[in-house]
Amino acid sequence: MELIVFAVTAVIAIIGAVAMVASKNAVHSALFLLLNFGAIAVLYLLLRAPFLFATQLIIYAGAIIVLFLFVVMLLGAERHEDNRDRLAWQRPVALVMAGLLLAEVAYVVVALPAQAPVTTDEGFGAPEVIAEQLFTTFLLPFQVTAFIILAAIVGVVVLHMQEKRQV
Amino acid sequence: MIEIPPIDWSVVLQLCIIFGGATALLMADLFIPEVRRRVTGYLALAVLAAAAIAGVAPWGCRGHTFSGTIQIDSFSLVLNWIFMLGAAITIVLSFDYLPRHGINRGEYYVMILFAVGGMMLLAQGADLVVLFLGLELLSITLYALAGFAYPRTTSEEAAMKYLLIGAFATGFLVFGIALVYGATGATNLAQIGAVLAEGRIDGENRIYLMAGAAMTVIGLGYKISLVPFHMWTPDVYEGSPTPITAFMSVAGKAAAFAGMTRFLLTALETQREIWVPILAALAAITIVVGNLGALTQQNVKRMLAYSSIGQAGYILLGPLAASERGTEAMLYYLLAYTLTNLAAFGVLIALEARGEAAWNLSDLGGLWQRSPGLAIAMAIAMLSLAGVPPTAGFVAKFAVFTAAWQAGQAVLVFIGVIVSAIAAFYYLRVVAQIFMSEPTREVEISSDRVLAFGIGLSVIAIVLIGVLPARLLNLI
Amino acid sequence: MTWLDIVILIVKCIVLTLAATTMFAYFTLFERRLLARLQNRVGPNRAGAIPLPGGQRILGGWLQPAADAVKLFFKEDVVPVMADKWVYIMAPGFAVIPALIIWVAIPLGYWPDGAGGNLLQLAEIDVAILYLLAVTSVGVYGIAIAGWASNNKYSMLGGIRATAQVISYELALGLAVLGVVMQAQSFRTDTIVDAQTTLWYIVPQFLGFVIFLVASTAEVVRAPFDLVEAEQELVGGYNTEYGSMKFALFFMSEYIKLIAMNAIAVTLFLGGWKVPGLQTLADAVTASFGANIGNAVFGLTSLGAFLLKVTVLSFVSVWVRATLPRVRYDQLMDLGWKVLLPLALINVALTAIVNVILPDNIWISGIVLFVLGLATLIGATILSRPKYTSSQVTMVKNNARS
């Protein structure tokens, strides 16, 4: 049962990722990315990490892709896409590199002895456990994040205000 | 209920002062009128001074807190002082620059304080997560500061390029940390070191560890602008407001070096035979490419950018030696380099009028006749960068070369010395231009006293350190 | 999990979907009649009326939703030539699916199935609150891509407005819910309902409740925050180019989301399905008719109580729509970012402080929080009063003179 769900979701995730890169239209790309993120959220659920599932949906699907769409729609960027690829020589190189990476992954999966799957207790991904980690082991990083966000907000506002003052 | 573990505040006192001061300053700035903007800068200096003094008491102690995610030792204290010194001189250099370029905003000083906080996290962090967050805080503030001279399109371009490349580098770093965690089951540097020392990592985990470590080094390498991750440096340095260029080139680089040294020497100590040759190769090409790139530059700001790439290669010799002595040499080099680069950029700031920039080499022509003080300062800075005695630069180069020699990196030292000799050409070209050429056009020179004070202070420090190196080396 | 379980699950889902759509249908009737009353009109009162002897007609209008549905079904289904066809067709689906799946995590009542489960809540998930927030935030895609795919400037503006609005109010909404989560110390909806046995969270979380009501109205882009489809400026906004059943789906998603929001508000702040005396009644029935009947009575009564509460909140929604004029775009953004978000943060801080200082007695801490919340609300109202500066007025006068 789980295997079926996993297979279906994984295929959807891969299709979403490939279609995102292949799609010419920026809005279509964003929507395929959404498909991919949704599938990954389901994969988290299969890994028994419900908290990650919810945050993946809220942050990536609910906020980031929406902002992508917002910007693309606002700028009308999807209509002016430059079709000339000035770095055309990179394309075959990238394909070769990707192929190498794939081969490497395949090697790791096939050639090396399979390890026993990591067993976790029931509440491994539960929000309570994550909260406890955040407030004990990772308390300092958790607090520092607040300053990172503050710095980012101040930076964006300052740059924006300067733009306004020019007008 | 979650019990919050006890916290040793003395370890994070400096961080608390910087972050608390920055936040308070952000609000205080609202009540300071624009004509009195300098007050914000002075307050920022006061915050830095308070944090610097707070570092005196724990000198010689070692300790860690917050579940071992952050630590304090002499290494981090010295680095913190270097960061604060760099930030303080940058603020002093900016007093005159900001109003002249119409970007006189109080947030500028707050952002510099935040950047210092990020750097201190990199120096004090004992956990990959903290190192990552410190680097992010530093990078995000620098992205905004690079674009601070917004009306100038080059500044915008600099911010854009820096942001895109920086985000890319962050991707490497995060993925690297994830792989290291996957392989060792720990993000704490000491724990990773312990796991590796036991030698239990083998098979696929070993592949993950190597890939992760490589990606982490690449992520940090972008910030240090090691070749081949240096492409962004000249453009970003050229476009950013000049004080920020100075700040980025010294303090930002020092912080990334701090993080890299911690990662390599604490976590990957036992894997030395793997990473030393790789980094040695990187250091060699960085020295060569940076200095050769600087040779052809006519634009002084770009020349200094390439020179800073080359200097990064020399600094890397310190951690490569993987010894106490190497680390000391690195700290010493960072201090000397910080002072020297700030002095050099300070002179450029003094020459940079609004709207036009005196960055061309020929604009320095005849500086000796127009402003002897600036001419001497620039000359000393260039000599120090070239590594000519009796300046700080000479002692610094000497220290890293000896450390590397003792660690058996003879080839590397050989390359370093030869390239230093070549590099002296373009540094001395600037000196020659200053003293022997005639001025080609009229360049307005700033006569701000604070700016002159900042440049003077750095120059005196360069010479003092150069003449009396033993005192400082003993201290470290 | 056996195949039978899966079949049962699917049947449950279908029943829930049908129930939600029926609720939507009758909510439209409810709204139309009520709006008509509030505006001194009569409203739809013909379809399905039952004639009584003596010329009287009762239940007039009860078939109106069915009539509307039939009408929409038989309209011509048009796809604009220049539209992005696939996205255009997908958009209504994107809109309606989140509106429907949001219901699975809401406990509609409590009907014990004998095995520790609850027949009236489809999914008892650990992160139910986060799930609700996630699904709400995904709901904006329908509108956004409908606006884009229609290839119509009005639609596009509607889509862009919707995106900005939903993102802005999501923050306040999430933080308002956070207060409840802190109070109940759980993300589970059933735990939150259980925690409200003695005291509904509307008392300690009064500030949160007000923020939630405002933010949820904005989140489902309903009057007075319906700039997305402002008829006067945008012709109809994102759904201008949609007709027939595709339009009906948008219409449906909007109303189902509204009811769902009200249902969430009931669950979080108004005690969910809890009513005083419910347990006594169920016990009495169990004693005389056996456990199955007792459970059934418990389930149906709690469901009825839940629906009653939802109806009360729905009445408020309609009332607000009939009363308040549409806000301007800058007012919308100001309210979201400068009023609701700080208020929600204050609410979180107050909740944390009061619950740590007064941990034991829910009544005392509840009342203290209520008073503090009310005071904050009054303070915010005074502070954010519209200011008419004299300069603005003179400017108008000067313009008029020149």
Image: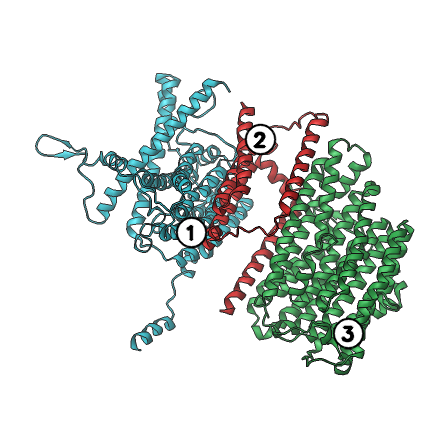
Chain colours: A red, B green, C cyan
Q: Residue at x 56, y 35 (%)?
A: A14
Do the CB atoms of the residues marked 1 and 3 lie less than 8 Å apart? no
Mark 1, secondary structure of its residue? helix
Q: Which residue is mark 2?
A: A48
User: Which of pointers 2 and 1 indicates the residue nearer the eye?
Assistant: 1
Q: Chain of mark 1?
A: C
**Image side of residue C367 versus residue B416, left or right:** left
- Residue C75: x and y in percent read 26, 38
Residue furthest to the left: C54
Give the residue pinned by disc 3.
B456
Q: Amino acid at mark 2?
A: Arg
Q: Position of residue A91 (x, y in %)?
A: 62, 45
Q: Calculate the distance from the C-alpha at mark 2 to the C-alpha at mark 1.
A: 36 Å
Q: Label 2 to label 3, Cα distance in Å?
A: 62 Å
Classed neighbour count for the residue bearing mark 3: other residues with Cα under 10 Å, few (<14), some (14–19), many (≥20)? some
Indicate the quadrant where residue B102 lies: bottom right
Above or below residue C388? Residue B134 is: above
Q: Residues within 10 Å of mark 2 (few under 14, many from 20)?
A: some
Query: Share a chain, discs 2 and 3?
Result: no
How far apart are labels 1 and 3 at the CA level?
Answer: 55 Å
Q: Secondary structure at mark 3?
A: helix
Q: Label 2: state its secondary structure.
A: loop
Position above or below: C71 against B159: above
Identify the residue position indicated by label 1 in the image: C160
Three-letter amino acid code at the position of disc 3: Gly
Examine the rendering and report whether any part of residue C359 can be seen: no
What's the residue type where badge 1 is placed? Ile
Query: Alpha-carbon neighbours of circle 1 within 10 Å: few (<14), some, or many (≥20)?
Result: many
Question: Which image quarter holds the C terminus of chain C?
Answer: bottom left
